[in-house]
Every structure is written in C-alpha cells, then in structure tokens.
Image: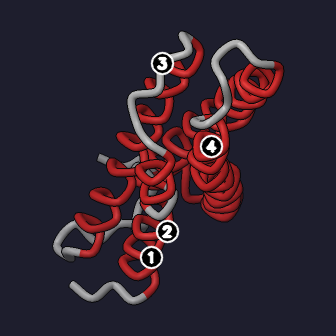
Amino acid sequence: MTFDVLGEYYLWTKSLHLLSVFAWMAGLFYLPRLYVYHTPAAPGSAQSELFKVMERRLLRGIMNPAMIAAWTFGITLVLTPGVVDWSAGWWHGKMTGFLGMTLFHHHLGYARKDFLADQRRHSERYWRAMNEVPTVLLILIVIMVIVKPF
C-alpha cells in the first residue's frame, strides 16, 4: 500500500529521515560511552549524579525524539510509491539493522533506569563492547541501502 501524494515530498521525507537517524546514531554512540565512565563512579557521588543528569538529557531530549522521527519518516518513505522494491532482499537487511537499533536503544534505556537506582548490572568492559554495536548496525544498514547486495 502506497500513497501517491507522498511522492511530491520524497526528497524532504528522505532528508528528514536521514537527519533523524544521524541524531539517533549520535546518541547510540555516546550513551554507552557515558555508561563506561558511570560504572566505576561511586553510587551517590557527585560524579554519579552528574552522569545521571547527562544520561537522562541525552536519552529523553535527543535519542527518544530522534528515534520516533526516524521511524515516522522511515514508514513514510515505505509508503511512498517506488521507494522500496518489495521483490528485492536488501530491505530485509536494512529492517533487521533498524530493529536492532531500536532494541539496542531500549536496552540502553533499561540500563539508565538501573544506573538511576545506583545498580551496576554490567561492567565497564561490557559497556565498552556495547559501544561497538551501533557501528556494526550502521555498517549493515548503509551497505543494504547503498549497495543493495540482495
């Protein structure tokens, strides 16, 4: 199902989608790094409390709105005639990466609640590894959209 009227706004929709994804990715790269530094901070310390504020502002002020916008403009693109060739397989890979970003986003959100309660469920090493997840997802998505190997 597509809507012909969306074709007129294709370039605007695509631009807004990309800007939203860039903002979202910036947060996905930065929040795990904040967790790396927050993990060893003593619970209740001034440093820990500062990280809590930074994490909340990043997640609620940038990442959540950017994710919602990326999804909204992405769905609008899918509903635009001629944008997706449903017989091709590349969009499965892109959607897998996009769903992975969303799941990772929610994982980071749940972790923020743990930090807010002064719980440290994961080590610095874990968060350093998690800091690489957005890069892998970004590589997958870009290759699927540009190269379209399937």
Q: Position of residue 89 (x, y in %)?
A: 19, 74
Q: Amino acid at mark 4?
A: Leu
| Picture disc at residue 28 | none
Q: Quadrant of residue 51?
A: top right
Q: Residues within 10 Å of mark 1 (few under 14, many from 20)?
A: few
Q: Position of residue 66 (x, y in %)?
A: 64, 40
Q: Secondary structure at mark 1?
A: helix
Task: Identify residue for label 3.
Answer: 119
Q: Secondary structure at mark 2?
A: helix
Cα distance in 3D space between marks 1 and 2: 6 Å
Cα distance in 3D space between marks 4 and 3: 17 Å
Q: Residues within 10 Å of mark 3 (few under 14, many from 20)?
A: few
Cα distance in 3D space between marks 2 and 3: 27 Å
Cα distance in 3D space between marks 4 and 2: 13 Å
Q: Position of residue 133 (x, y in %)?
A: 42, 60
| Picture disc at residue 31 | 4
User: Sequence order check: which comes first, mark 4 or mark 1?
Assistant: 4
Check contact, mark 1 vs mark 2: CB within 8 A: yes
Q: Nearer the viewer, mark 2 or mark 3?
A: 3
User: Sequence order check: which comes first, mark 2 or mark 3?
Assistant: 3
Q: Quadrant of the C terminus?
A: bottom left
User: Sequence order check: which comes first, mark 4 or mark 3?
Assistant: 4
Task: Identify residue for label 1.
Answer: 139
Task: Identify residue for label 2.
Answer: 135
Cα distance in 3D space between marks 1 and 3: 32 Å
Q: Amino acid at mark 1?
A: Ile
Residue 8 in the image: above or below residue 37: below
Which is nearer the eye, 17 or 12?
Answer: 17
